[in-house]
Image (cartoon, grey):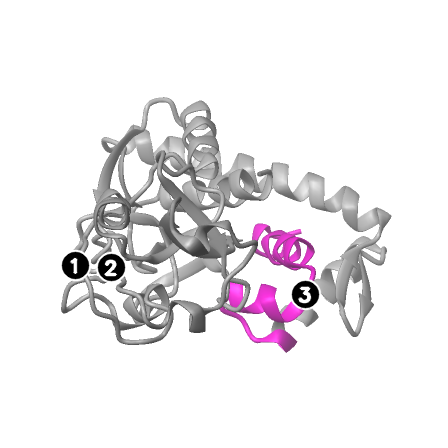
Amino acid sequence: MELRTLRYFVAVAEERHVGRAAARLHLSQPALSRAVRQLEAELGAVLLDRSPRGVSPTPAGAVLLTEAREVLDRAELARTRVAAAAAPAVVTVGLLGDGTDPGAVRLADAFRARHPAVEIRIREADLTDPTCGLRTGRVDLALTRGPFDTTGLTVRQLRTDPVGAVLRSDDPLAHRDHLTLAELAGRTWFRFPEGTDAQWAAYWSGGEPRSGPVVRAVQECRQAVLWNGTVGLTPLGHALPPGLTAVPLPEVEPSPVVVAWNEDDPNPLLRSLLRIAATAYRNG
């Protein structure tokens, strides 16, 4: 068995869908399906139950999934230890806004345990650059949110979060169990500066041009609501300061939490960090 084939199988088993796994691996679906069937032939066992809705590991496939993850982890550890011995090991990670996300905390703990000698440099970006400096080379990897222009970047979704409207707690709408964008149409919204990624700005303004105070950071968003009575969107589940309330907006697509990087980045530690990130957020 080749490491590459094991990596293909793990992607299919984790995604439970050949199409999603092919997109994750940047392969065509037929090529990925052939590789998995060749692996089944090599092992003499059916590894996946296939149906029109997707795939799921068979008992034999579940055993291989556990073993394959361990083999790939050991191979990646060997690769990164060799790289660390050959040159100083440094990875710069960009974080968007609130860096206390439990997934990011689990990632930091797991990466530290796996690579205690690696220096992680953190750059906290403001809300005007959802890529956290990837395009300017300021970071190796970004833990951020979509949607944004992904041209030239590789992006992997880790989780999605529903969003809601953030309001003053004494706002008449703050006591509703949900709201619609139409009910907020006449309100003043906080908004991002000119030049902010267009997809990103449109999503967080509810898809409409808005008027209101310009903000660059999470705390500025919250203070704009607290002091001016503006409204805006926020991921649900985030702790808000006293005086603010988040009300669900079911019609708005959930916000994807993603990891993004430049595919041609030569830093050998990135692959290990990406694998650990997938596990850290999945386990959450």
Q: State whether residue 249 is above or below residue 52.
A: above
Depth check, mark 1 against mark 3: the one in front is 1
Residue 214 circle label: 1
Question: Dot 2 corresponds to which residue?
Answer: 190
Amino acid beneath label 2: Phe
Q: In which quarter of the image is the C terminus?
A: top right
Q: State whether residue 209 is above or below residue 25.
A: below
Q: Does the magenta stretch include residue 28?
A: yes
Amino acid beneath label 3: His
Amino acid beneath label 1: Val
Q: State whether residue 98 is above or below residue 5.
A: above
Residue 83 percent coordinates (x, y): 33, 36
Alpha carbon distance from label 1 to label 3: 42 Å
Question: Dot 3 corresponds to which residue?
Answer: 17
- Verify CB contact (< 8 Å) between mark 2 and mark 3: no
Direction from residue 84 to residue 52 in the image, left or right: right
The kind of secondary structure element at disc 3 is loop
The numbered mark, 1 or 3, whose residue comes first in the sequence reads 3
- Verify CB contact (< 8 Å) between mark 2 and mark 1: yes
Q: Is residue 145 magenta?
A: no
Q: Where are the magenta residues, as a range?
A: 1-30
The numbered mark, 2 or 3, whose residue comes first in the sequence reads 3
